[in-house]
Amino acid sequence: MEVADHKAPTLENGQLADENADVLQFMDSMDAYFTLLHSLSSTLRQYQIQGWLELASARHSMGAYRVNTVLLDHTSHSAATTLLVTQDEGKVDSVEPRFTLCKWGSSSNEKFLGEKQSSQDQLHPQLRHRGSTQLSEEKTSSENKASCEIDDQVQKGRSKSLSVFGTLVSPKLRSAQLSFETALETLVEMANARSEMLYAFDKVDKKLGDGKE
Amino acid sequence: MANRNQIPTSNSALIAMIADEDTVVGFLLAGVGNVDLRRKTNYLIVDSKTTVKQVEDAFKEFTTREDIAVILISQYVANMIRFLVDSYSKPVPAILEIPSKDHPYDPAHDSILSRVKYLFSAESVASGRR
């Protein structure tokens, strides 16, 4: 009887420890979310305000008829800035998505150039046995070439987006574009913080629901 | 055992927007605008003439599209369809309430915080103790 009595509390303690761990994880993620939300809201508002002011300034210098939604491209076209959505494979039965911003197709370009680089490395494995200086110089020049190609792609994307409002646009419109790009990065961080918190919240909520039953 | 709760992964998912003109134009400058072959856009510009029904329909459409991963909605617009936003619970697309030019962000109205708040309410704590 005494042995059974000792075993029952151990089982309950184990279950309690699991529940406490989930609650702690939720509290941590919520704290992180609030902290991030506060700082990102300020950053977002800062870049949005900056963007709005620059947009208003561009409208003032270019004219309201040149910076308005009537000029938006309504023909079929794909977004140049998209999101990469992945699932956190480390978690069992995870519903926590991770978002990665791909600005002007840059992440897909980096992946392509990375694959090109690795295939070139495979074709010339003997280079690894030569002086390390030569190898690092060759790597640096190929990396520079890759980054130049990505920069060109990004600049082309930006120019195409601005061209909706005419060939010659105000520098303020270009600045507004950069401000909103930064705001987008901030928003993707917020989306990731949100999904992390919701994942922890769902775990705790489920445990509470099971406990009531 | 296969995961029951799979989320749709994608390498080129869209960002949708339901916001005022300047916010939408700004993010379109950042390259998020998409128009498909049926001329359907991934944004709705909300102005004084936009009805609640139009906002509702756009929200419902964007939340059911598989190619959209995040929906940016101005908080004052979300307040127009608060019941719909608060009842939404899927992980993707993620709904982000953002401030607008004339309406700063108010955490009290955020749908995520509303969901979490009840965990700390007296009723929830009391029912857990029974």
Image (cartoon, coloured by chain):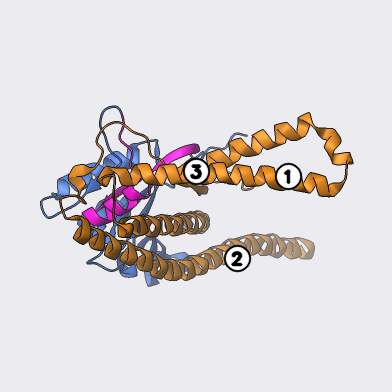
Q: In the rendered structure, which disc, 3 or 1, sits on the residue that comes first in sequence?
A: 1
Above or below for A104 versus B119? above
Q: Is residue B58 left or right of residue A177?
A: left
**What's the chain of the residue with tag 1?**
A
Mark 1 against mark 2, which lies toward the viewer?
1
Q: Nearer the viewer, residue A111 or A60?
A: A60
Q: Colour of chain A?
A: orange
Pointers 1 and 2 in contact (CB under 8 A)? no
**What's the chain of the residue with tag 3?**
A
Pointers 3 and 2 in contact (CB under 8 A)? no
Position in image of residue A91 (x %, y %): 61, 48
- Mark 2, other Cα within 10 Å: few <14 / some 14–19 / many ≥20: few
At numbered mark 2, what does the secondary structure look like: helix, strand or loop? helix
Mark 3 against mark 2, which lies toward the viewer?
3
**What's the chain of the residue with tag 2?**
A
Residue under the point 64% across and 39% down:
A114
On the same chain, marks 1 and 2? The answer is yes
- Spatial distance from mark 3 to mark 1, Cα to Cα? 20 Å
Q: In the rendered structure, which disc, 3 or 2, sits on the residue that comes first in sequence?
A: 2
Chain with blue colouring: B
Stretch in magenta: B10-36
Q: Is residue A174 visible?
A: yes
On the same chain, marks 3 and 1? The answer is yes
At numbered mark 1, what does the secondary structure look like: helix, strand or loop? helix
Position in image of residue A201 (x %, y %): 49, 58
- Mark 1, other Cα within 10 Å: few <14 / some 14–19 / many ≥20: some
Per the image, the residue denoted by label 1 is A139
Above or below for A152 versus A181? above
- Mark 3, other Cα within 10 Å: few <14 / some 14–19 / many ≥20: few
Amino acid under disc 2? Asn
